[in-house]
Image: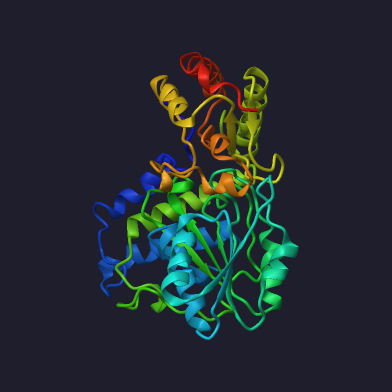
Amino acid sequence: MIYLDNNATTRVDPMVLETMLPFLQGEYGNASSGSTFAKPAKKALAKARVQVAALLGCQPEEILFTSGGTESLNTALFSATQLHTDRRHLVIGSTEHSAVLKPVAWLEKRQGYEVTRLPVDSLGRVDLDELATAIRPGRTAAIALMWANNETGVISPVPEAAALAEAHGIPFITDAVQAAGKILLSLEGLGIHSLAISGHKFHAPKGIGALYVNRHFPFKPWMLGGAQENNRRAGTENTAGIAGLGAAAELALHHLRGHAGSGEGSGAESVRQLRDRFETEALRRIPGAHLNGDPVRRIPNTSSLRFDGVQAEGLILLLDQRGICVSAGSACTAGSLDPSPVLTAMGLDAVAARSTVRFSFSRLTTADEVDQVLDGLEKSVVKFRSLFPAEGLNG
């Protein structure tokens, strides 16, 4: 199988698994216990906190371990709205992940919040002037803007947006689930209130993530109970998962800084080169193929392509039969009959949105795999169009 659905999840790196195994076997102590047996677990948590902080360019005490991106984002929204209960207005991007869209919709429908959803242009970009106009001084409780889009890879102007929010004293939340481990981040001094990451997007296991909480801002915990995570997130720590997250963070930073060595398919720049070569060849070989999103300002591993006269669902099935795994977009909305809200927000009609396939690479992807995918993609598009000629080329 050739796997190009890394924005949905990634393979656990063997070095990450090796780091986790001791805490699934002999070192099974509870990190919150006071016994000598718990010391290895305590040390593992402290080490992972340092490793994740290094990846994000922040201080270790600003890292709060969670179960993943969804919990982190819900926690951040809860904290922001509880800090200023008199503020009843939220500003979010229109192309946010459902982990932001759904809790905000709940706040809107059940709690009476007013919500401004920032539009994007045809390349998926947010306009900072529109953000500035949307802010209601003294009334806006939080601004949420994702760092990199999970479907198109388009990068938002998060540092500038965070500075704008800070100038108005508004908590700024960012979903960095697709950005962490793919581009260099440095949060120190940015004015971001909170930031979410998820380990399974950069070769750690599923079910572990982190929330960055700026040490200069107040914070209200969402999960109550024990005193874990310095009273910020109750519940027994997932020691093995946290150790794996730390190891994955260290490996990701190693690759981002260009120390990946000469192995094929390793290193951040080689991922970009493979992605770019794939796109260039796909657009050249396949008539009626188009790129979605900003071709420049995006994370290096993501390619969103649409194919005239093709339905993504059928094309994905044909590719799957060739042993090639890709997706139509977000794994969290798989199976929905509605066109992608991200693509429709960019101005694509339902037909164009439903003809889109997402290809997402990782440092484990090889040049030979890209060649095989290009061959399989070209043949699959031709086959689909021959089977359903009535679809035609829709522009």
Quarter where residue 290 is shown: top right
| Residue at 54%, 79% in the rendered image | 88
Q: Residue at x 66, y 31 (%)?
A: 276
Q: Position of residue 232 (x, y in %)?
A: 41, 75
Task: Specify the farthest residue to the bottom.
Answer: 86
- The one nearer the camera, 165 or 177, is 165
Instruction: Indicate the colouring scheme.
Output: rainbow
Residue sticking out furthest to the right: 129
Residue 55 image-quadrant placement: bottom right
Q: Is residue 321 left or right of residue 166?
A: left
Quick check: 308 above or below 174?
above
Quadrant of the drawing holding the C terminus: top right
Residue at horizontal 61 percent and vertical 69 percent from the top: 192
Name the side, left or right, on which 21 lies relative to 171. left
Q: In the rendered view, would you say 270 is above or below 91?
A: above
Which is nearer the eye, 211 or 241? Answer: 211
Please state the horizontal and vertical placement of residue 275, each as a whole percent of the image: 61, 32
- Measured as percent of width and height from the top left, residue 148 is found at 59, 51
**Does the rendering let one see residue 376?**
no
Q: Residue at x 28, y 75 (%)?
A: 34
